[in-house]
Amino acid sequence: ASLRGKVNSEAVQEHASRALWGLISENAVNQQRAKGADADEALHFAQNVHLESLPVQEACALAMEALCSGESFADGIRTTDYGRRHQVCTPIPDTALRGVSL
């Protein structure tokens, strides 16, 4: 709530951004949830409200980096030798569905 403009306290926005960073930096599920909740908009809002605050700017930048990490991984891997050798995808059967009939 603090990042969406309900609380304009600089300290609250800094700590909320750092907390978000901690939640999503090593957790893909939390990263997806944060994206679904438009966390990027909230972070941009916090940055715009506190333009002069270096701690808020740094905390928001860290959170944005964590939020966007992995988005360009597929493009980057294609430029490697491994990526060029494996351009064609190999289907992998879902073994979790063994014995399931529809």
Image (tube, rainbow, N blue to C red):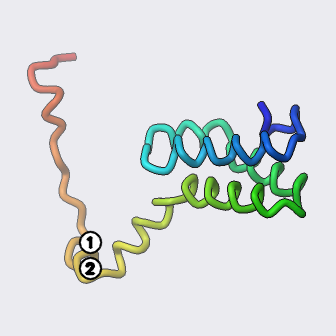
Residues marked 2 and 1 touching at CB (< 8 Å)? yes
x%, y% of residue 57? 76, 60
Left or right, 99 with respect to 91, comes to left
Q: Quadrant of the N terminus?
A: top right
Give the residue number, with chain letter if any, for mark 2: 84
Q: Which mark is residue 34?
A: none
10 Å crowding of disc 2: few (<14), some (14-19), many (20+): few
x%, y% of residue 74? 40, 66
Residue found 61% across the figure and 38% down from its top: 36
Residue found 45% across the figure and 38% down from its top: 29
Residue farthest to the left?
Answer: 99
Residue found 84% across the figure and 60% down from its top: 53
Q: How many marks?
A: 2
10 Å crowding of disc 1: few (<14), some (14-19), many (20+): few
x%, y% of residue 7? 87, 34
Q: Quadrant of the C terminus?
A: top left
Residue found 87% across the figure and 38% down from its top: 5
x%, y% of residue 73? 42, 66
Residue closer to the observer: 59 or 34: 59
Q: Quadrant of residue 27?
A: top left
Give the residue number, with chain letter if any, for mark 1: 87
Disc 2 residue type? Arg
Distance from the alpha carbon under mark 2 to that under mark 1: 6 Å
